[in-house]
Structure formats: C-alpha cells, structure tokens
Image: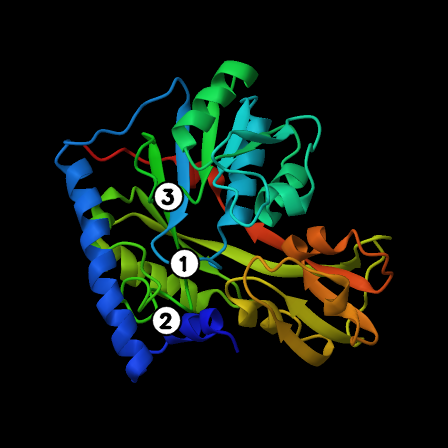
Amino acid sequence: MNLKTKITKLHYDRNAKGVLVNILEGMSYVYGLGSGLKNWLYDKKILRPKKVGAYVISVGNMTTGGVGKTPVVLEIARYLLKKGEKVAIISRGYGGKLSNKNVNIISDGKYVLHTAAMAGDEPFWLAQKAEGACVLTCKDRYKAAKYAIENFGVTKIILDDGFQHRKLFRDIDIVLMDSKMGLGNEKLLPAGPLREGAEALDRIDKLLIISKDTDHTKAEKFARIMEKRLSIETMVCAIEPDYIYNIKTGEHLEEGNAVTAMCSIGQPQQFFDFLTGFYVKKEIALDDHHQYSPIDLVDIDGNVVTTEKDAVKLLRFDKDNIYALKLRTVLDVERLLNVKRKS
C-alpha cells in the first residue's frame, strides 16, 4: 500500500491515531487557513466571480473523489441536449497529459479529438458518452467557458468538479455526497477528505445524495437527515449496476462467471460490491486515475471486469478478456435543476 492509498483510508477512519495522523492534522491547519481565507475574500465580495454569457451549472463535492460526479454530469448534459441547448462540459483535466494551462478541446460536439491518456479518463469518457456536447479541459474554467461560448455558441455550461473554483460565477451549485462515506472523519485535507470547512455549506443550492446500492432506503433516510441538519434542499441519485459487457465486442457476461475485478477509482470497494452476482477471484484496487500499462494485466488469468472510466484506458491493449460494468443513473434532472439561487 503506497502513502496516497494509506492516507485515503485514514480519511474514513474516525479512530485513526499515530504519528502520520498528527502530521496530517498539522498540515490540515495550514490548508484550512488558505481555504478559509479564499472563501472569506469571496464571501465579503473583495474578490468577485466573473460572469459569462451562458447559464452555468456546477457539479462538485465537499470531499475528495469517488462520489459519482461524472455520471451525474452526463445525465445533466443529456437532459439539456434533449431540450435543444448547446452544451459544454468543462473539466480541469486531472490525470491527462495535455497541459491544463491551455484550453483543450476534447470534443467539439461531433468528434472526440484526444485519447484518454491525453485528455484524462473522465473528460474522455464524457466526450464519448455525451454525444453533441463540447468537452473542454482547462485549469482556468472562466477562460474555458469564454472559449466555449465564443467558438461553439454554448448556452449551457456544466462545470465538472467546479464547487471550489470560485473564479467563475455559477447559476446553480450542486454538491454531491456519498450515502455510505458521508464526510468521512470530517477533517480537512490532508488529514481528512474535506476540501473546505463549514463556511462552504452556505453556497450549496442543492445537495445530492449518491446511493451506490441496490436498496436505497438508507440513502433516502440519510437525505432527510442532511436536509434537516443543513437546511439545504436534498434529493437522492441512485447509481446501480446494469450489466457487464466486453469492451471490444459488446458481448454481455452472464452472472456466475469467474472474474478478476480491477479498477483505479476513488472508492473502489463500492465497485467491488456491485459484482455480487459473479465469482470474484481477486480484487485489484490501483491508485485513482492510474495510467495502465501492459504489465498490469500480465498475471491475470481469465476475464477482467473494470469500470467504464477504466475501460477507456484499457481499450488500446489487444485483449479480448476485458469487460466493463455498465451502470445506470436514476435521477430526476428536471427537479435537480429547479432551484432558487440564494441571495
């Protein structure tokens, strides 16, 4: 287990103790000062977010990755496209080889212009799935938003993981929370998974509880608790397993088959839990956004099942035994977007 993985485990262990925990808590204090100062400057209108000539929807987290932003972004994009809107999805492009100091066009709405390795797995996946939407990556979301409006005539912009990027004004701030993981140990980075302190709660327009389970009763109860506790309109989004398919042929894999489960996502256990209908010989959890190489597959016999986000990086290997788990997202997008901006 490398240091990054070890720290991630500590984020969800309220009873963790030791030298490493003490060091991380000291670093969290410094991080909190910086994060709190930035928010204070914006809250007091000393710094002001910049507006663009399009409606901006931010989908983000208060915690680190693995909550389920990408499928939610996809559902919102598809909904808006059906309404006849010209949509752009803007991401930071984390994990891609393209310099995010520049505006990178991953998709122009017609063609996917970069590989997963260059674009980053999440922007590439969105470019493939959100047919008709432009997908751009850039560290400066304001710069990317202006580019999308001026060059593609965009009317709606979706910020993928945009909650902490306050430079760009947004019309709606949607924040996701995992129904099982919650806020972890409720400590700031790097001692915990929180990207911001309690001051960020006032910026949330709608809280979306993500349920990655087959029974959503607990998630619905958790949503009611959070809505009462935070006084923020809250709803549930269900992300459920649908079927497993071969990434080269599209052939479905029937339940009961033996598989090796492999992924590189923020919360790997939730992926593994979706494979209850299969005989899982081995579970392999790699670092989030891991860049695969042929050696990762050398010692694996039989069929490999991975996530769709991992699958886009494995397609380049000449393998016939790689399958992906197709998920379905159950979400009332119209209700999600129907919020009143706080004054």
- Label 3, on which residue? 174
Above or below, 55 relative to 304: above
Q: Is residue 74 visible?
A: yes
* Label 1 packing within 10 angstroms: few (<14), some (14-19), many (20+): some
Q: Earlier in the sequence, mark 2 or mark 1?
A: 2
* Residue lying furthest left: 44
Q: Is residue 255 above or below residue 70?
A: below
* Residue 83 vertical position relative to residue 40 in the rendered view, above or below: above
Residue 155 visible (yes or no): no
What's the residue type where badge 2 is placed? Answer: His
Disc 3 marks which amino acid?
Ile
- Earlier in the chain: of badge 3 and badge 1, it is 1
Residue annotated with mark 1: 64
Residue 175: x and y, percent?
Answer: 36, 48
Q: Is residue 39 left or right of residue 209?
A: left
Name the element at disc 2. Answer: loop
Residue 56 vs residue 46: left or right? Answer: right
Query: How far separated are the C-alphas under marks 2 and 1?
Result: 10 Å
Q: Is residue 132 left or right of residue 90?
A: right
Q: Which one is in front in this view, the residue at disc 2 or the one at disc 3?
A: 2
